[in-house]
Amino acid sequence: MGGNCSCQKRRSFLQKSWNWIRLTGYAMLIYPVIKFFHFHVPEKPRYVKIGKVLAEGEIYFDPDFALFAGAEKDVWAVSRKCTHLGCRLHYSEKEHLLICPCHQSRFTPHGKRIAGPARKDLKMFQVEMMTENGREGYVVTL
Ligand code: FES
């Protein structure tokens, strides 16, 4: 009777060990597949040229960003893609805010999130002055 019990314990132990070995094997097989699908190739930067200089307070809208001109030639470009689920933001002249039409997240012109389900601030893009064919303007790097 005692020998039979120890045999069952050993069988149970071997069965559990075998299950762990199988589980580890599956994980080792699945890991490269998961890694492959999560592999991130960095996108090439895209350059958008704007062939004019904005006056103070003026805003230029591109489908992907809004370019704001502040005081003393300060310009900045902020993404129009909502950080919640990616809807395109609209600018409210009245409230001076970027507002998401989908779930009403709100952002300042500098991309700071102030309300709504979005948790992150908006992405900012690099802006540089350029001169092309004698005309000044900007290049925004997306
Ligand atoms: S997609 Fe903008 S708040 Fe949901």
Image (cartoon, grey):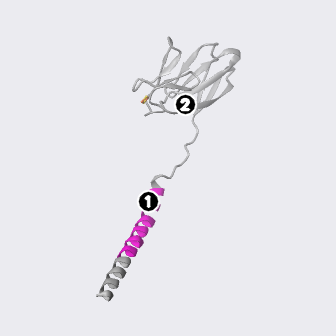
Q: Which residues are magenta?
A: 15-35
Q: Amino acid at mark 1?
A: Val
Front residue (pair 56, 20): 20
User: Does residue 119 lie above or below 42 as drawn?
Assistant: above
Q: Secondary structure at mark 2?
A: loop
Q: Amino acid at mark 2?
A: Asp
Q: What is the x, y in percent for residue 121?
A: 54, 31
User: Does residue 9 lie above or below 127 as drawn?
Assistant: below
Quarter occupied by residue 27: bottom left
Q: How many marks?
A: 2
Instruction: Give the quarter of the figure containing the C terminus.
Output: top right
Q: Which residue extends farthest left?
A: 1
Residue 121's disc number: 2
Q: What is the x, y in percent for residue 20?
A: 41, 70
Quarter occupied by residue 49: top right
Mark 1 vs mark 2, CA separation in Å: 32 Å
Residue 33's disc number: 1
Residue 13's disc number: none
* Quadrant in which ligand 1 is drawn: top left
**Contact between labelled residues 2 and 1, with CB atoms less than 8 Å apart:** no
Q: Is 118 colored magenta in this rendering?
A: no
Q: Which residue extends farthest front?
A: 2
Report crowding for label 1: few under 14, some 14 to 19, many 20 or more residues within 10 A (C-alpha).
few
Front residue (pair 93, 53): 93
Residue 13 as seen in the image, left or right of residue 58? left
Q: Is 30 colored magenta in this rendering?
A: yes
Q: What is the x, y in percent for residue 80?
A: 50, 27
Residue 120 as seen in the image, left or right of residue 26? right
Q: Earlier in the sequence, mark 1 or mark 2?
A: 1
Predominant SS along the magenta part: helix
Q: What is the x, y in percent for residue 26?
A: 40, 66
